Amino acid sequence: MNPLSTERRLLNYALLFKKPILLGIVCLIIAVALELTGPFIAKRLIDQHIVGVESQWYQVEDQDRFTVVYQGEFFKREDRLESSDQTSDVATVLQVERSYYFIPEEVPLTGARSLEEGTLTIETAEETIEAAAEPLGLQQLYRFFQPEIPSIYWLLALYVGLLFIAAVFQFAHTFMLQKTSNRIIKKMRNDLFAHIQRLPVQYFVNQPAGKVVARITNDTEAIRELYVKVLATFVTSIFYMFGIYVALFLLDAKLALLCTLVVPIIYVWMRMYKYLGGKYNRVVRSTISDLNGNINEAIQGMSIIQAFRQEKQTSSQFEQLNERHFTFQRKLIRLSALTSWNLVNVLRNIAFVAFLWYFGSSSFGVEGVVTVGVLYAFVDYLNRLFQPVTDLVNQLPQLEEARVSAGRVFQLLDEKGEPVRNEEVKRYKGHICFKDVSFAYEKEDYVLKHISLEVKPGETAAFVGHTGSGKSSIMNLLFRFYDPQKGEITIDGYSTKEWSRQQVRSHMGIVLQDPFIFTGTILSNVTMNDERISREMAIDALKAVGADRFIEKLPKSYDSPLKEKGDSLSMGERQLISFARALAFNPAILILDEATANIDTETEQLIQEALEVLKKGRTTLVIAHRLSTIQSADQIFVLDHGTIEENGTHDELLALKGHYFQMYRMQQGAAREGQRVITG
């Protein structure tokens, strides 16, 4: 098992594309920085240009763009004064409730204000001040705002411009991260599919096909969501939160420090969710694999299910799995529903309580120094802070689902595979030797015991025996689907273990009892899309085995489409295509695994003619069911419980009157009985 954690291995996949990811993160940082300037711009706009009219105004002699004309005199705000300005009297503009007033003297800008019959009262910690106040009409008030209008427009334009620029960088960030995420998952799927082709045959014997398919499709799709959506959300949210905290500390360090309590709360919650959500998700993902296996098996065996009226039992098995999936999916939903939104709302409300308490107790008193702009910016940033928090919490279910799926994918990738070596091996002659070979699929339960045999180049050797005698196991060893525990197998004097499995098989061909037809055309089923096999070679092979007799009657001839399993063809027609497939690759060693067992008597003659073409010039090993098909074999090996009981030609074995003789008599008797039934 790989010692690296699932998270580390997911990171390693991401680091394969670190350049576009880093570029996307840089775009994200720029976008976040630009977007977070908004409250600061709003703060300046409010404090400096809107609320800023509440200030001391000095009477000046010269007029410029910051000068306000009031009752025939020129006034200029205190913070707009320049060193060259000549000042005289001081006045103050203040807001009381919803109206503005002009006070023709300097009064404090802080303190509690009240107005009664034209007299303004200001109470501070040290004193109480009274002054005459003149109400400002709308036209007069507008004059005091007029110098600030260009700056207000400029700041608004700047804000809109920054938002547009941020949108461009946000698009670049989203596009690059999602594009890279899809590239990561594409590589992962390619690695996974390549790896399963390196796995030994035993793995697929013990693992239902549906479960393997689920890991390549469903689990990798969950991981894709991790890279495309979850991690993108996490990265975005973390940078947003970091930027917001920087802004909060710039505004008020003490309150920002209180807001950092959100971080450990989220961390603790994520750890808790990882434990509970991970436990539930493991059951959910495992059950999905079982469901896929169940569905795959049901579809493959639907004809048997219907023939034996097993629909109810099959549905019951499916419903049990579906119920388990539903139960644990419901637990996940309950876990998310009880905590996700509730958690964020509680945190948001606590933060606002702290905000109100802090500003209410510290800043709204007589000596309050907090400006409206600061209040607005803080509220804005607090609202913005909980949006990424919400995004983070809402992605936890997908994060855990992806993490569990990734664990299952990496578990498959950690299965010990076989090295792939495709270096060309010179075409061997096909001299096969088994030297005292013993083999067991499981520990010491040997299915082959001390097998020794020799098949010379160009010979045809047949293997006969009852079910379980070891015929197919000999072929599995020759093909190096397995290696023997004892003894040695050689081809032309070379041990098969000296070559890679791919090199051993490079000059072998096989025709199975139930030939497999792939989705495609007749020609693609012969060439297997191998560039070395041309169209002409494939057609010649089909003609050589006699398949052209039925192919040329089809509407599209050799380009006729075939579906998986080739159900539109008869068994004999599928077998001829598999013969042509073997012939096109011109193997030195040909294995026929009961290739005529399922063929009707009428088609058998055609198949036998094709076999003669196929066997010519190559070493042929035949697993035989019908003894009538192997009478011309150079050698016949009779197996019984994993040992070779008899060996010789057809005539020699009949003369021995042993196992072969008994089998032959039984088949001949059965054939004569069948003939009597037909003619009778």
Image (spheres, rainbow, N blue to C red):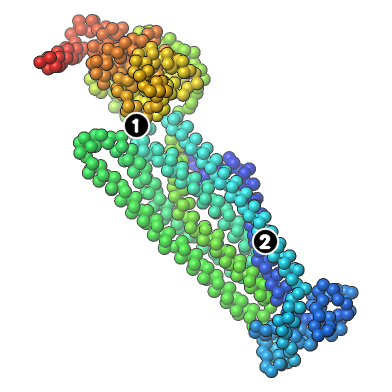
Q: Are marks 1 and 2 in contact (CB under 8 Å)?
A: no
For label 1, the SS is helix
Residue at the far bottom in the pictured view:
117
**Residue position marked by numbered label 1 in the rendering:** 205
Query: Local crowd at mark 1 within 10 Å, few (<14), some, or many (≥20)?
Result: few
**Residue 84: image location, x then y, percent:** 89, 74
Up the image or down, 639 lies above or below 561; here it is above
Rendered residue at 32%/28% (across/down): 567
| Amino acid type, callout 2 | Val
**Residue 137: image location, x then y, percent:** 71, 84
Q: Which mark is residue 546?
A: none
Q: Looking at the figure, which quarter contains the N terminus? A: top left
Q: Looking at the figure, which quarter contains the C terminus? A: top left
Up the image or down, 143 lies above or below 427; here it is below
**Residue position marked by numbered label 2 in the rendering:** 160
**Residue 627: image location, x then y, percent:** 23, 13
**Residue 23: image location, x then y, percent:** 64, 46
